[in-house]
Image (cartoon, rainbow, N blue to C red):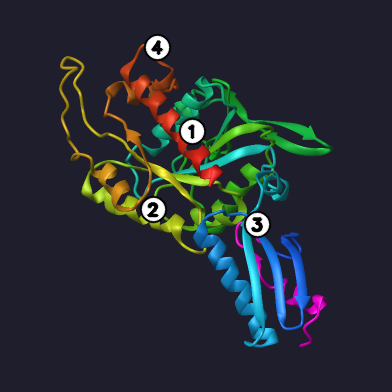
């Protein structure tokens, strides 16, 4: 193959940008392409600013070019992070949402949905524009936690296209599969059907301008998670775990899932829920029912930020059952704990964006 600009671009058209799901030529990510004798010089932008992502892109470019033009050619390739405004311009799904964050857990029963609801509430309290997608297809709980079980999303027209209008509670926009099913009926769906239903809550809904859209994922690592990262522009993920060993083993799998090359979603941090129990009548006492500092130590061992510890408090469960997240309680130690978690979470998201 002759070493000319047209042929080089044709070869580069086979190199995919993993986050944008488009090749680097059609996505206009190739800059400063020059061909001088036996040397190809170019600059390429990538969505993920991490060093390993840039190195992987450079290797893919060099492999494809040498495979077509011969190993003797010299390639000078600079891979740089895409400016934030350019990244937003490429986003077709949820273009007005600044941060799309998944909340995951390796196993059920660790309080992932409760943490999601209170994290959303804390962000709203702090003045951010927040939305929540209840993607826990088989056990949707957000309608109960936000006291909107009997409500249903309405429809509105956006630029001539009908869109689902999310339900609003405490100023938070909410969509849940629970709005579209009977509360007492089991949702029995195969993987592809569940994945399609989830995708529609992003593509067929009007979320408008949001600072944070939190996605409450089903527990585990399966079809829903893979479909999500393929269809939705995730900026990061949070993993929730209790301190006990069986939960930590699954939390480790959850972190590693997001680190897979095919998924490649930054892990913002780990949250330790049910870290200790303090009886109401003995407020100074802490009982480490599920073990001590397990998730905190896991975060350190996996080189992942630790976002904080939340105690096991009866009032959190009661608040969720009546549809008023505990973070909205005034002068409450648990509300203070959630507020501190929110501050740490926002700080880590900002640090991730600045890398």
Residue matched to label 3:
20
Mark 3: give few (<14), some (14-19) or many (20+) Cα within 10 Å.
many
Residue matched to label 1:
346
Q: Is residue 232 above or below residue 161?
A: below
Kindly report the distance in space between the C-alpha atoms of the residues bearing marks 1 and 2.
21 Å
Residue 152 location in percent, x, y? 61, 29
Mark 4 or mark 2: whose residue is earlier in sequence: 2
Q: What are the residue bounds of the magenta stretch?
A: 1-22
Residue 192 location in percent, x, y? 56, 58
- Classify residue 335 as left or right of residue 297: right
Kindly report the distance in space between the C-alpha atoms of the residues bearing marks 4 and 1.
22 Å
Instruction: Mark 4 and mark 2 in contact? Answer it, CB < 8 Å.
Output: no
User: What secondary structure is marked by label 2?
Assistant: helix
Residue 14 location in percent, x, y? 69, 73
Q: Is residue 5 shown in magenta?
A: yes
Residue 72 location in percent, x, y? 64, 88
Mark 1: give few (<14), some (14-19) or many (20+) Cα within 10 Å.
some
Dot in front, 4 or 1: 1
Mark 4 or mark 1: whose residue is earlier in sequence: 4
User: What secondary structure is marked by label 4?
Assistant: loop
Which quarter of the rendering shows the N terminus? bottom right
Kindly report the distance in space between the C-alpha atoms of the residues bearing marks 4 and 3.
43 Å
Mark 3 or mark 2: whose residue is earlier in sequence: 3
Residue at x 45%, y 55% (from the top left corner): 258
């Amino acid at each position: 193959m002759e070493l000319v600009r047209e042929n080089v671009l044709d070869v580069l058209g086979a190199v995919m940008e993993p986050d944008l799901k488009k090749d680097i030529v059609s996505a206009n990510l190739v800059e400063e392409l020059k061909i001088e004798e036996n040397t190809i010089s170019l600059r390429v932008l990538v969505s993920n600013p991490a060093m390993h992502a840039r190195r992987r892109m450079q290797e893919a470019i060099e492999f494809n070019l040498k495979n077509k033009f011969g190993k003797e050619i010299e390639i000078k390739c600079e891979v740089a992070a895409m400016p934030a405004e350019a990244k937003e311009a490429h986003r077709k799904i949820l273009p007005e949402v600044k941060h799309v964050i998944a909340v995951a857990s390796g196993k059920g029963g660790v309080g992932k949905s409760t943490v999601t609801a209170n994290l959303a509430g804390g962000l709203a309290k702090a003045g951010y524009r927040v939305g929540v997608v209840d993607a826990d297809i088989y056990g949707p709980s957000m309608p109960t936690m936000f006291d909107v079980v009997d409500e249903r999303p309405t429809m509105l027209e956006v630029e001539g296209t009908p869109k689902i209008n999310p339900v609003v509670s405490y100023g938070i926009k909410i969509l849940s599969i629970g709005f579209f099913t009977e509360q007492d009926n089991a949702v029995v769906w195969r993987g592809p059907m569940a994945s399609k239903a989830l995708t529609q809550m992003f593509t067929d809904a009007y979320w408008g301008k949001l600072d944070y859209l939190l996605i409450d994922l089903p527990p585990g690592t399966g079809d829903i998670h893979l479909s999500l990262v393929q269809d939705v522009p995730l900026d990061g993920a949070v993993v929730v775990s209790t301190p006990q060993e069986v939960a930590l083993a699954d939390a480790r799998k959850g972190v590693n899932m997001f680190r897979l090359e095919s998924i490649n979603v930054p892990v913002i941090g780990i949250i330790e829920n049910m870290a200790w129990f303090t009886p109401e009548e003995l407020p100074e006492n802490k009982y480490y029912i599920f073990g001590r500092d397990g998730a905190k130590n896991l975060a350190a061992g996996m080189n992942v930020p630790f976002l904080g510890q939340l105690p096991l408090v009866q009032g959190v469960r009661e608040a969720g059952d009546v549809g008023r997240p505990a973070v909205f309680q005034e002068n409450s130690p648990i509300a203070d704990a959630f507020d501190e978690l929110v501050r740490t979470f926002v700080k880590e998201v900002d640090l991730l964006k600045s890398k």
